[in-house]
Amino acid sequence: MSTQERIFSTASWLVFSMLLLIGVGIVGRVVYIQSYEFERWQAEGESFNAQIRSIEPSRGQIFSSNGSVLATSVPVYELRWDSQVERFDAQDFDAALDSLSHGLARIIGTRSAAEYKTRLRKARQRGARYELFGRDLSYLQMKELKELPFIRKGRLGSGFMFIKEDKRLKPFGALAARTIGIHREENRVGMEASWNEALQGVEGQQLQMRASGGVWIPATEDYVVEPQDGLDLVATIDMHLQDVASRALEKQLVKHNAAWGTVVLMEVATGRIRAIANLTRDGNGKDLQGAAPKYYESYNHAIGTAVEPGSTFKLATLMAAMEAGLSPETVIATGNGVTSFYGKKMHDSNYDRGGHGDLSIEEVFEVSSNVGTALAIQQTFGEQPQAFLDGLAAIGCAEPTGIALAGEAQPKVYREVGADRWSKLSLTQMAIGYEVTQTPLQSLALVNAVANGGQILQPQLVESLERNGRTVETFAPQVLNPAVCSPTTLATCRRMMERVAAPGGNGTASPIFRHSPYRVAGKTGTAWIAGPNGYDGRYRASFAGYFPADAPKYSCIVVIADTRSGYYYGSTIACPVFKDLADKVYATDPSLHPATEGNFADAPHLPGAKDGAKVDLLTLYANWDVPYTEAEPTGDWVRATTGADTVAIRSLPIPAAAVPDVRGLGLRDALYLLENAGLRVSTNGIGTVRQQSIAPGTALRGSGTIHLELS
């Protein structure tokens, strides 16, 4: 053997020896781990595949004051299958496979029975763990699936498991959507944000295992710590009034192609908000085809948009002046409706018709004279402008309402002469609602104070918190300012506001309320909109007031910005929305009418009624002695036509295999008929069905969805 061969042989043996030693070491280490460290590493491995994890509780619901659900968490489920569960019985599985596949196809519906059968077999063959078979399943689907053959053996026997997740829904869609808010992990808004702590509940804990794809699933149906569901929130909003407010506002916005608008209806005695609508135009107005603009609840202008209020601020202005000694009988010479302050002209709305001439303070307010208001403030505070600012602060104009809703904008009212952009013009500009900003809700708070006897109340959006139908906490009215002014000044302010809307008077809102069966007190407002280059010819219209004027129950403000119809006065743009809402309240609130004695038959008008179930309708007529006639034999469902002296009852045919005509029925009766016909129902609005998406008499072809419009 040559020297080179000996060197190669020696090197080979050295390499072999090293590899042998490494192999022996690995085997030894494996034996050692299996024998002495098995429990340690088993626990370490399980820590990656099984953990005690937090469980989100069910979020509390949000209800309206009249019991409607405004926001709710609806459970949805995933159906998964573990084909390697310990108690799996292959014979039972094979025996139930056909009926199981047909059941999955019928209930879930995304695949055929044959496809489900093939998928189940393949998943079994490859030993699939936690295979997904259905997602976004409803509670009813989940209950039905649990009754299928094989699945009904339970999770440990079949391997099928249901994983629950809650989805947040708003059944009324856009109605008060921005106030109700949005529930999400970040940037919640509205009541969902401000009341999140109460709504979210307390997390629980559960042992879970990690499945394929990083999905965590329960290892057991038991909890380490039971989650505590969130509290239910009862809002002050009345959805009947909310519907009216939103529709009236949208109608006016569309008519005048306005940029945005808001309306708030508040209960005078409590500060509870019964309706709040905020609509913003989508885009820049009409499209190229001339279609009407669309409006959405995309921002809460009532709470978050602080603007120059214009003439509605004259209430605070003259209140402060009268508290400082200005007599309501003081006569102001407004002349031809044009005057100048430090070289800047100020006009009244009728300056081109010669102006108002001499006006008392009450008349200045009644006709909304800019010149008269500014002159009155200059006369009262010209030598002591700080006294004017102090007077506004004493009223509460410089403070936010503190409403329990995130996003309230701060009002901007000078607190000291010379501060910020104060100038010689500031006193007279503030007098007519410029160089100050307030949100619509902040403006309404003062109007509501005049209505309730002088107290500024904190606006309320939540009446109580509940758990399982039992009240946990209630929220009483909160007084922010017990007396905005003296009783004498308050009486004058109420009288001035009544003159603004008095039928047959000279007030700016008098024509709108000429034929109203109730009296209104309020103040119109029309303000220039400030842009980057100053006031550029755009306007913001408003009306704030209360009703009935003699016994106030509700206060309300309407603000509509940047109309493009050529109309912009508060009396023309904002007042009609106020009136539509007030008319609805007056017609439906029994407390605003004296009690009727005797039977309806003796009343001036018989009560109207919705069509519906005959037995219910006739029971009411019998109890109230309402006369009615049946022109022909009728079935279980009838239509009612109310005349001057009697109600005519006629039959409402319900076809056996066709879509029934539910127009004129209440929602409860309509749901009964349509769901019995096998249809799913979606709705929009409140009240009586006025339109249905599938024409009456259309042949039924299995299950489908019909949409109802109510009003």
Image: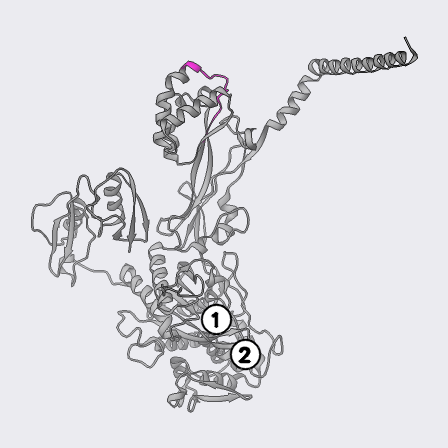
- The answer to which quarter of the image holds residue 289 is bottom left
Q: Amino acid at mark 1?
A: Val
- In the picture shown, does residue 655 fall above or below 690? above
**From the image, which quarter does the C terminus lie in?**
bottom left
Residue 463 percent across, percent down from the top left:
42, 52
Residue at disc 2, secondary structure: helix
Give the quarter of the figure containing the N terminus. top right
What is the C-alpha distance between the residues marked 2 and 1?
A: 14 Å
Q: Which mark is residue 550?
A: none
Horizontal side of residue 404 vs 117, given as left or right: right
Mark 2 surroundings within 10 Å by alpha-carbon count, few (fewer than 14), some (14 through 19), many (20 or more):
many
Residue beneath label 1, please?
Answer: 484
Can you tell which quarter of the image residue 153 is in?
A: top left
Q: Which residues are magenta?
A: 79-91
Q: Nearer the viewer, mark 2 or mark 1?
A: 2
Q: Residue type at mark 2?
A: Phe
Asked whether the viewer can see residue 264, the reply is yes
SS at circle 1:
loop
Q: Which residue is mark 2?
A: 388
Q: Going 19% across and 56% down the picture, which residue do you hit?
A: 608
| Magenta-drawn stretch contains 19 | no
